[in-house]
Image: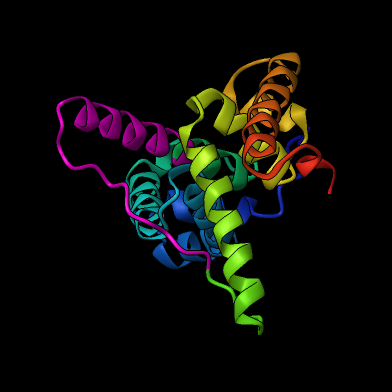
Amino acid sequence: MSGAGDNPDEALVSQARAGNKRAFSQLVEHETGRLLALVTRMLSSPSQAEDVVQDSLASVWLTRHRLDPDKPIGPYLTTVVLNRCRDRLRRRKVAGFFGLSGDDELHSIADDLPGPEALAVSREELNLVQAEIARMPVRLREALVLVTIEGRSQAEAADLLGTTEKAIETRVYRARNRLKERFEKLWGVGWARA
């Protein structure tokens, strides 16, 4: 773990805490793309991802006195963003329960590669996987996205989610099995082995 003086962003965090907007912008600039990708995967909505990340960064700015100069900013921002995602998902659930229109829009996966036929098949498969991930319970989805998609270690995911490595391992295993079972039904045995 980081100790005092190990954080390369220490000076920027201190300046941001003092109210320097430019320092804050520099501090979060290299994290924004990763956060957008994380939220898009959690909510299955690129447009909502931008809103959540902007809201999260505004919230961090307003509570900048909580930033710790001795700790890296990335895990803190990830925690704030995940909490915002959980809030959005709870609101969706409540809206769905009362029959109100939710934020469930069809999302396409942007891709610049040639070959429209191959792209159509790939996009359809990605949309199906994304939809399946969106149907998972939040705990399974968080663990799967952090470990499998973002490439974080189980220890990092456990720290971010406030649980144990074993719990993360179990959640990722269950999430993968759900995907495997679902897509073997759709595409036949051996889908996950390809």
Above or below, 127 relative to 177 = below
Q: Percent x, y for residue 125?
A: 60, 55
Q: Percent x, y for residue 190?
A: 81, 40
Q: Percent x, y for residue 144?
A: 65, 34
The quadrant the N terminus occupies is top right
* Residue under the point 28% across and 35% down: 92
- Left or right, 48 with reference to 34: left
Callout count: 0
Q: Nearer the viewer, residue 177 or 110?
A: 177
Q: Percent x, y for residue 163?
A: 63, 16
Above or below, 165 relative to 37 = above
Q: Nearer the viewer, residue 117 or 56?
A: 117
Q: Nearer the viewer, residue 56 or 10?
A: 56
Q: Quadrant of residue 64?
A: top left
* Residue under the point 66% across and 85% down: 114
Asked if residue 98 is among those painted magenta in the image, a careful observer would answer yes
Above or below, 126 relative to 25 = above
Q: Which residues are magenta?
A: 81-109
Q: Residue furthest right?
A: 193
* Residue under the point 33% across and 32% down: 87
The colour style of the image is rainbow
- Left or right, 103 with reference to 64: left
Asked if residue 125 is among those painted magenta in the image, a careful observer would answer no
